[in-house]
Structure formats: structure tokens, C-alpha cells
Image: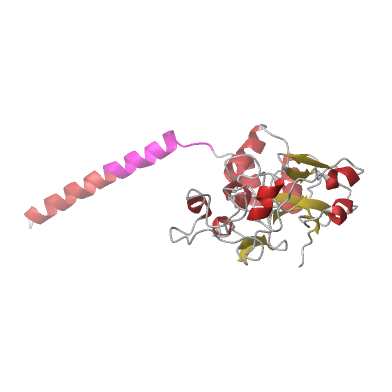
Amino acid sequence: MNGILIPVVIVSAIGLVLGLGLAVASIVFAVPVDEKAAAIRECLPGANCGACGFSGCDGYASALSKGETSECTRCTPGGQDAATAIAKIMGVEAGSVTPMVAAVMCQGNFSNVEEKLEYSGVRSCKMASQLFGGPKNCVHGCIGFGDCVSVCQYDAIFICDGVARINPSNCKACKMCINTCPRHLIELFPLDTTKAAVLCKNHDKGAQTRKQCKAGCIGCMKCTKVCEAGAVTVENFCAKVDHEKCIGCGKCHEVCPIGCIDLIRLTEKI
């Protein structure tokens, strides 16, 4: 009997000593909890998207608590509600958050762009773009394999006729899709405002662009001549619009011979 009890007692004693040691260590090496950071973290949505410019929600909360930033409006997924709650904890004015929504600057659907090869590899835009620029004739447009869809946490992106499209009622402007798109085709627009947008990122000369896509910008500069606000410019054979200068008059849209400039008004409901 003693042959059984002695090992049990020894193991129990060792366990007790180790337990006490761990308890003491947890007290000695305890990391102080930043209560303000924890409270701020509760106000954030937990997307960890990095749209705020920090590593994630924890990083942003820590930066606010430590005074590394005083901007309460950096969390676009959280919007005005998050900014107001954070400002209350910080004891400052919240400021206003301009609601933003993402949109895809491409019309390279199957009607406008033909395929030059049959792709049978990994269904990834990033991977496909490394094989002769992707399966479509236009090497600047949307590949349509949905890398942006896979990173969207809000079920806001879908593929329609070979091109990614975004549901503005679900989009939180977290920029995950913007950072993921290998062609850099996704941009943010202010919600409920009308802005002109060039739905093309092709920087080839006009004649080459026309061979690749029926809806591609040919850099004719007609849009720049009619824009009274100076919002439209042409760089590397492709027009671009400065959204801050654009007044949404629609003149560039009217004169575009290709129809690649459109007036975009994104609302919460579509």
C-alpha cells in the first residue's frame, strides 16, 4: 500500500510547489492592464483591417490611450458611432466622419473584353496576373477571380460578368479590398455625393487600349477641356478625376466618346 501512496504524495507535493510557483510568477511578472485602451477597444468593431493606419483595433486603441494620436475618426468601419464613443472616453470632441464606400474602376466584363487564353491555375487574381498578365486581353483591368471577395468581411463584394462589383449598403470602407487588388482598381468615394469617375486604369495608348477593351479610356482629353473645376486630368494616356475638386456637373461624362467616365452616386441602398 505504501508503494502506491508514496508516489502519489510525491507527485501531489510537486504539483503544489509548481502551482505556488506559477501563482507567484503571475503576480511578479504581471503586465499592467491599460484600462483606457481596453475601454476604447470595446468601441471598435474588431475588423482589424488597418484602415486606421495602425496594426489593427488593438494597435489603434493603444495609440489613442498613449497619446500617439488624438484622431477619433480613423475607424471607417466603426463610423460616426465609434468616433463618438471614443471621444467620450478621451474627453475630446469627436469630429465628423465622412462615410465612404468602395467602387471598382473597371468595365472589363465579357462583353467589352475578350479572353486571350484559357486559365486553369489557382483561381486568384494575384496568381493569374503573373501568367501573361491574366486571361483577359486587357492587362490593366479586373481579372474577376475574386481576391477582393475573399478578404471582404462584410459580404459586400461579388463577381458579375467577370468583374468585381461592390454593394454600397454592405461596404464599410475598410480598404481590405483596395490593399488586395493586384491591379489597384478599387477606390473610395464619399457616400451620398455625386462624383465623376473614370472606370478604367489602362495606361496604353488609345489605339492599343481599343484593341484590348471596348470601354477603355483612349486619353482623348475631351474631358479635361470641358471640366470647369479643373478636376479631370490625363496622365499616361488615361484620364483621372480629383474627387475633392469634382463638383459632379457631368460634363466630362457627356463628352466622353467611349463612355468610360460615369457619374457615381453611392447610397446606402441599391
Along the horizontal axis of the image, is 90 left or right of 38?
right
Where 118 sits versus 200, above or below? below
- Residue 206 placed where, x, y %? 71, 47
Along the horizontal axis of the image, is 56 left or right of 3?
right
Per the rendered image, the range of residues in magenta is: 17-32
- Residue 223 placed where, x, y %? 84, 47
Along the horizontal axis of the image, is 238 left or right of 63?
right
Q: Is residue 186 visible?
A: no
The one of 270 and 21 positioned closer to us in this rendering: 270
The one of 114 and 103 positioned closer to us in this rendering: 114
Q: Is residue 49 magenta?
A: no
**Residue 212 lies in what quarter of the image?**
bottom right
Where 261 sits versus 26, above or below? below
- Extreme residue toward the front, this view: 207
- Residue 258 placed where, x, y %? 77, 56
Q: Residue at x 22, y 46 (%)?
A: 13
Q: Residue at x 65, y 59 (%)?
A: 108
Q: Residue at x 67, y 32 (%)?
A: 67
**Residue 28 lies in what quarter of the image?**
top left
Instruction: Classify the position of the N terminus by image quarter.
Output: bottom left
Q: Residue at x 86, y 53 (%)?
A: 255
Q: Is residue 27 visible?
A: yes
Where 92 sits versus 76, above or below? above
- Residue 194 placed where, x, y %? 85, 55
Q: Is residue 25 magenta?
A: yes
The one of 90 and 255 positioned closer to us in this rendering: 255
Instruction: Classify the position of the C terminus by image quarter.
Output: bottom right
State whether the magenta stretch is mostly helix, strand or loop. Answer: helix
Along the horizontal axis of the image, is 8 left or right of 20?
left
Marks counted in the figure total 0
